[in-house]
Amino acid sequence: MRTLVSNIKTIVGARRDAPKRLCGEEMQHLPTLNDAWLLIENGRFADFGSMSDLASRHLAADTEIDAAGGMVLPSWCDPHTHIVYAGSREGEFTDKIRGMSYEEIARRGGGILNSADLLHTCSEDYLYDMAVERAMEMMRKGTGCIEIKSGYGLNTADELKMLRVIRRMKETLPVHIVATFLGAHAVGRGYTMEQYVRLLIDEMIPEVGRQQLADYIDVFCDVGFFSPADTARILEAGAHWGLRPKIHADELASSGGTEVGTAHHALSVDHLERLSDAQIQVLKDSETMPTALPGTSFFLNMPFAPARKMIEAGLGLALASDYNPGSTPSGDMKFVVSLACIKMRLLPEEAVNAATLNAAYAMGAEEEYGSITPGKTANFFITSQIPSVSFIPYAYTSPIIKRVFLRGQEI
């Protein structure tokens, strides 16, 4: 099956040979091809070129699509979400408006524990239906890869229930999904910290491993949650079952999450709102991708991750939505790209690279996604007629996506 997309104003992220990730000044380079065509074959990018040479190529296609002067971009990749949850938390939203902090809400039994209580009463079918609705919203907004975490179960049965829902989503949706076990999101009700860590190590992680329900393991390593020492114990237990870390780090304080993450070869360390200069140096010699979640900073009125400092120090950077009911009830990656430019001073090219190729790396999917490269899975979207790449973050609420394709098929 061959599909030819013609009359493309600009292909963005057109790379014949894509690197695994981009670091430092490399992030400013976003290759484009103007007045172009794109060929998809059997769900994969096959070739691209200029419209001026299309007639001489004599390309046969089963389906022809006129981009009508729109741009073509690789689908956004979202390497940090929590979209399997039971209900919204707008009551806490009001508490925050009245001045209560995220930590205060957590201490009084709200936050993550509130979501765990709600999830406990819900069936797998209900959780699946709600999560699919959120995933479909994300797909329509241009996202083609989603990492989904557990973490609202906080006991063995409910964590496994969440991971089974994610597995079912993997099997039924056209979007690429990876699953992360986040049993260490908070301490479950009725447990001391030590009791809960032992439950994670002795029962939850082995069961997740035996059932092969997760690709990665996560820990909320921060003040008031899990210490670096407890995080290390949990990550070591996960490594025994082949679960590589992707961890929450340094959101509420510079708490050592980056150090323990890189020491255990984490694929990514995420949040980083309180990342220090010393921690930037720790990341420099690692394969760990720092991942910023500007939607969280926006919604909680927190500092933004020091993205400009990271890039100027030679680091790569990925962007993610953190879509969840408490701190970021949005999976709109276009808005994330806008926030990265407006609030973290990324250039538009850097922000697009951070939300595509580097974001794919942050979920272990860079070989298949994140750029328009022959051989990669054909996840892309066609925009309306827009003047430039910079218009995408500039017009921060304007809907620009006209058509979305996953695995080469329009959704």
Image (cartoon, helix red, strand yellow):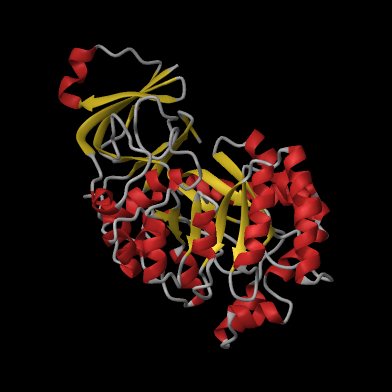
Q: Is residue 165 above or below residue 405?
A: below
Q: Is residue 331 visible?
A: no
Q: Residue 274 appears at what percent x and percent y?
A: 45, 73
Q: Is residue 15 above or below residue 398?
A: above
Q: Quadrant of residue 196?
A: bottom right
Which residue is farthest left?
52
Residue beneath the point at 21% across and 20% down: 54
Q: Residue 39 appears at what percent x and percent y?
A: 34, 23
Residue beneath the point at 25% across and 11% down: 58
401 to the left or right of 117: left
Which residue is farthest bottom?
98
Q: Is residue 66 above or below residue 384?
A: above
Quadrant of the rendering where the N terminus is positioned: top left
133 to the left or right of 411: right
Q: Residue 187 appears at what percent x and percent y?
A: 74, 68
Q: Nearer the viewer, residue 205 or 407?
A: 205
Residue beneath the point at 40% across and 40% down: 370
